[in-house]
């Protein structure tokens, strides 16, 4: 494994599971000191990304202990949505608050910690559902579209101060979140259709998103900021209707 992140300090939200956990593992394997936070058990610190006071305390503690924060990965998130005529306001607020406001609050305190260093990399986990509409997507798509645009805005504000800000738009990645959506009874044909829509014919692995996180966090991405990197096995590349199969090619 390359050691691109030696001496760097990283904070990863949603670090107890899925993409956040895989990112923490990858950043650590590349030499970073990693602090994971999550609302669930299994992270270094319990924290709700909607709680600004707790986020401010987290960054104060990390800076006190390690003198710096170089990398922040916003991977905490929840699934949700539904057609708007049956979507409760409280459910809308839950999804948008965790996915979008949580990203804002963590990015805010990350920037405060990074500004004195005049360097840093923030990587937000958005989604292809922040780039394209999807059936029943509503609050989730709105939150992720917001993350994509927030990423670009923050990148503009802090580029001259040495802080790079990018997001990753994953396709369907095999994590507990995806399994909670595709595993319930009666979802087999939906699951198969979803898998087929990825040109590579499979769902992604959390480690494949983590590899992109490590790249964007590292100096290998030193001239990349304000970018939304699609990691989706070709889902958004275009339509595959099976023409070549039919032609025997
Ligand atoms: N799995 C996919 O197919 C997929 C695709 C595109 C984008 N994403 C995004 O990737 C990110 C990670 O998702 P995942 O698939 O690894 O899901 P996951 O459920 O495995 O992990 C998400 C983690 O976020 C934590 N979390 C939820 N609410 C929180 C809060 N308020 N404060 C702190 N932590 C909180 C959860 O406890 C969990 O550990 C999410 O933002 C998700 O929207 C996932």
Image (cartoon, rainbow, N blue to C red):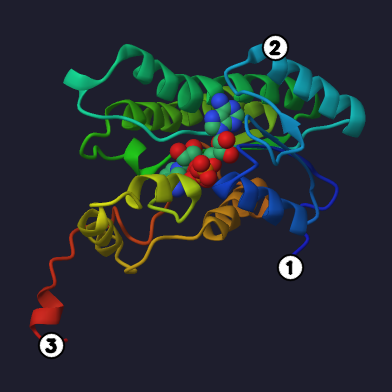
- The x and y percentages for residue 100 are 47, 24
> Residue at position x 44%, y 60% from top?
204
Q: Are marks 1 and 3 in contact (CB under 8 Å)?
A: no
Q: Quadrant of residue 199?
A: bottom left
Q: How many marks?
A: 3
In this rendered view, identify the residue nearer to me: 14 or 148.
Answer: 14
Q: Secondary structure at mark 1?
A: loop
Look at the image and tell me whether residue 15 can be seen.
Answer: yes
Q: Quadrant of residue 197?
A: bottom left
Disc number at residue 53?
A: 2
Q: Are marks 2 and 1 in contact (CB under 8 Å)?
A: no
The answer to which of marks 2 and 3 sits earlier in the sequence is 2
Look at the image and tell me whether residue 229 can be seen.
Answer: no
Q: CA distance from mark 2 to mark 1?
A: 37 Å
User: Is the residue marked by circle 2 packed among few (<14), some (14-19), or many (20+) residues within 10 Å?
Assistant: few
The answer to which of marks 1 and 3 sits earlier in the sequence is 1
Disc number at residue 248?
A: 3
Direction from residue 187 to residue 85 in the image, left or right:
left
> Residue at position x 16%, y 86% from top?
249
Is residue 150 positioned above or below 22 on the image?
above
The residue lying furthest to the front in this view is 185
The answer to which of marks 2 and 1 sits earlier in the sequence is 1
């Amino acid at each position: 494994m390359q050691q691109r992140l030696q001496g760097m300090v990283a904070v990863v939200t949603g670090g107890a599971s899925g993409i956040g956990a895989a990112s923490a593992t990858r950043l650590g394997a590349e030499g970073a000191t990693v602090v994971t936070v999550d609302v669930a058990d299994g992270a270094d610190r319990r924290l709700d990304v909607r709680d600004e006071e707790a986020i401010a305390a987290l960054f104060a503690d990390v800076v006190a202990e390690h003198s710096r924060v170089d990398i922040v990965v916003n991977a905490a998130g929840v699934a949700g949505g539904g057609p708007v005529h049956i979507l409760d306001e409280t459910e809308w607020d839950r999804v948008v608050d965790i996915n979008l406001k949580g990203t804002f609050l963590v990015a805010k305190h990350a920037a405060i910690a990074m500004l004195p260093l005049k360097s840093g990399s923030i990587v937000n986990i958005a989604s292809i559902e922040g780039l394209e509409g999807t059936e029943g997507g509503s609050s989730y798509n709105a939150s992720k579209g917001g993350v994509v645009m927030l990423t670009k805005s923050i990148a503009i504000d802090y580029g001259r101060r040495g802080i790079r800000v990018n997001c990753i738009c994953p396709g369907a990645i095999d994590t507990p979140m995806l399994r909670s959506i595709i595993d319930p009874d009666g979802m087999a044909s939906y699951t198969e259709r979803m898998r087929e829509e990825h040109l590579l014919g499979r769902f992604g692995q959390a480690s494949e998103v983590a590899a992109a996180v490590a790249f964007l966090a590292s100096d290998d991405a030193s001239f990349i900021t304000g970018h939304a990197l699609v990691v989706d096995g070709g889902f958004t590349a275009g339509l595959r209707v099976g023409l070549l199969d039919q032609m025997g090619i």
